[in-house]
Amino acid sequence: MSLQKVTARDIIEKKKKGEKIVTITSYDYSFAKIVDESEIDLILVGDSLSMVMLGYSNTLSVTMDEMIHHTKAVSRGVSNALIVGDMPFLSYKIDNLEAVKNAGRFIQEGGAEAVKVEGGTEIIPTIKAMIDADIQVMGHIGLTPQAIYQFGGFLVQGKTIEAAKKLILDAKNLEEAGVFSIVLESIPWQIAKLITNSVNVPTIGIGAGPYCDGQILVIHDMLGIFTDIKPKFLKYFGNIGEAIRSALNDYKDEVINGIYPDREHSYEFQQQELNKLNKWVENVDICEEAHKLL
């Protein structure tokens, strides 16, 4: 495709023009290539790979090295979408210098154009340090999965007036700090609408209703591949998991019953040469010939 690479500025412009922003996660070359061919605006290499790719029970276990590994794979398959690397647990909240270095790894090693961090007003100094180092930053408030032990689980946030006020103020502070967009996760749609109308940078919703400037889903969730959990906001846009299971069962049956591979899916050896080879096999001691190669 000959599309121009999407930039953080393009994402901001989409909000100004009233155009919806379409984003999705990806974690490997093959999926990223398909997503990019679909002209998706932004690909997040999410720390959700901890669950859907690595089998952990939450997002806290994935490491920086694992995130960089998967970001590299995604970047090899993408020519058009903006790639955002999701900064994992403990990679940016301990020390600002370490945070900038880790963010820089996503850009320098991983091939991403931006990073995402979870948190509100409390991490503004860290965000500013990254932006001062010429790193584009996406914010993330509401349900921030790296804080699930603090929240007591994957629970909807912003359900009281005080909590909703805090989200609105956090979003405004993130905008003023210089983020190019803000993910709003698992909050009532009315609060997401208020936030979206309060800030000039795009809001990207996941479980935040229809009034955000864009939407994101975990690709393995929306395709029905990862089915361990199904939050209320999740819609299956395909049942690829079932298609995969069906294909594997068909493959298994055909192998067991000698149907696959057939001649159509096999390579041919020239018959005249095969006759010579058969004669050789009949007239030599295979063990003796093999030992000569040692």
Image (cartoon, grey):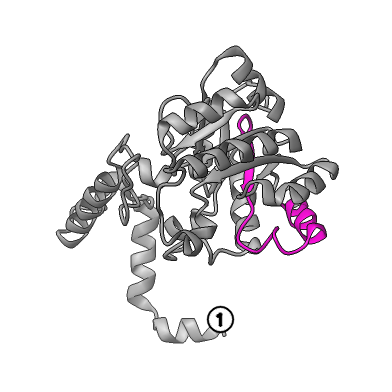
Confirm whether the magenta stretch covers residue 70.
Answer: no
Q: Is residue 117 shown above or below 7? A: below
Q: Identify which amino acid the numbered label 1 is placed on.
A: Leu
Name the quadrant containing residue 102: bottom right
Of all residues shown, which one is farthest toward the front? 162
The x and y percentages for residue 185 are: 48, 42
Q: Is residue 90 shown above or below 248? A: below
Residue annotated with mark 1: 293
User: Is residue 168 left or right of 215 when viewed as pictured?
Assistant: right
Query: What's drawn in magenta, residue-wise?
Result: 79-106
Of all residues shown, which one is farthest toward the left? 257
Q: Nearer the viewer, residue 11 or 34?
A: 11
Residue under the point 48% across and 32% down: 192
Placement of the C terminus among the 4 image quadrants: bottom right
Q: Nearer the viewer, residue 96 or 217?
A: 96
Q: Is residue 76 visible?
A: no
The x and y percentages for residue 274 are: 36, 58
Residue under the point 41% across and 26% down: 210
Q: Nearer the viewer, residue 257 or 93?
A: 93
Q: Is residue 113 shown above or below 92? A: above
Placement of the N terminus among the 4 image quadrants: top right
Of all residues shown, which one is farthest toward the right? 132
